[in-house]
Image: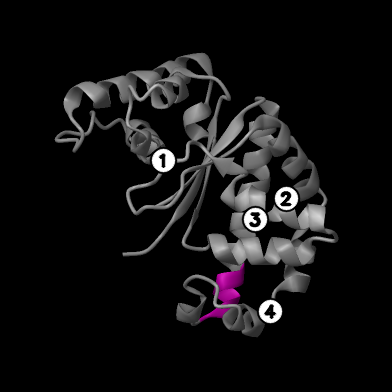
Amino acid sequence: MGWELQLNALPSKCTLLENVVSSDIDVEYLSFVRRYFSLRREQHSRVNKFPYGEAEYKQFVDALEELVETHSGIENRYCDLSRRFDWIKWLLMKCALSEEEESLAVTAITGQSNVLPSARSTQGFPIRWTPADKCELIHIWLSGITEEDIKSKYAPVLMYDAHLYKWHQTRDTDEAFGWIVRDFTALKRFYEDVVDHSEAVLIVTD
């Protein structure tokens, strides 16, 4: 079993978050936002035998469907960094020119703060959150970084020595860099879309 990281656009105020804060919906449900939208895009029916009970799951689904109706395209505003999140974070930190930029690099990948002290994914990782104003700062900073900047910092041996998650399993470093470039491009586009819609970001590691 491995860990994967996903970033999802989410309005700063919405029924889903309100229900989580008020404990009407278990906070762990936030781990399933991307999964539900993925199933929805594939036009699957609702997931059966959901482990937390049909009534609470219906509240979760209704809250997400409300988002789809009120925030056009939100189900497609996400960035899946899979198991490579540590790689891109390391490279972004190498591109940083100050402590402030290092902070933006980390926040871009792992979020600014926990949604709630009790908010954990199914594997026990904190479910994190970055508000809209911080997303705008991240977007501005990422806009100034190019593929060439990433390439200039790419150092497979140093990345191995840094014990980055799953890097020791990498066999083809050229192929790995191709994935990194795709992730970097997707991350920049994601934050641009989030800022264009004045949204925040939900970060789930699971």
Q: How far apart, in angstroms, are the residues tagged by discs 1 and 3?
A: 30 Å
Mark 1 Cα-neighbour bin, 10 Å: few <14, some 14–19, many ≥20: few
Figure quadrant of residue 194: top right
Q: Which amino acid type is marked by label 4?
A: Ala
Range of the magenta residues?
172-177
Instruction: Residue 103 in the image: state x and y as whole percent.
Output: 73, 53
Find disc 2 in the rendering and name its residue.
104
Instruction: Residue 127 in the image: state x and y as whole percent.
Output: 46, 44
Question: Disc 2 vs disc 3: which is toward the camera?
Answer: 2
Q: Tell me the number on the disc at residue 184.
A: 3
Asked which secondary structure carries label 4, the reply is loop
| 113 inside magenta stretch | no
Find disc 4 in the rendering and name its residue.
155
Q: How far apart, in angstroms, are the residues tagged by discs 4 and 2?
A: 21 Å
Mark 4 Cα-neighbour bin, 10 Å: few <14, some 14–19, many ≥20: few
Q: How far apart, in angstroms, are the residues tagged by discs 2 and 3?
A: 14 Å
Asked which secondary structure carries label 1, the reply is loop
Which residue corresponds to the image point at 55% horizontal and 73% vertical from the top-left? 164
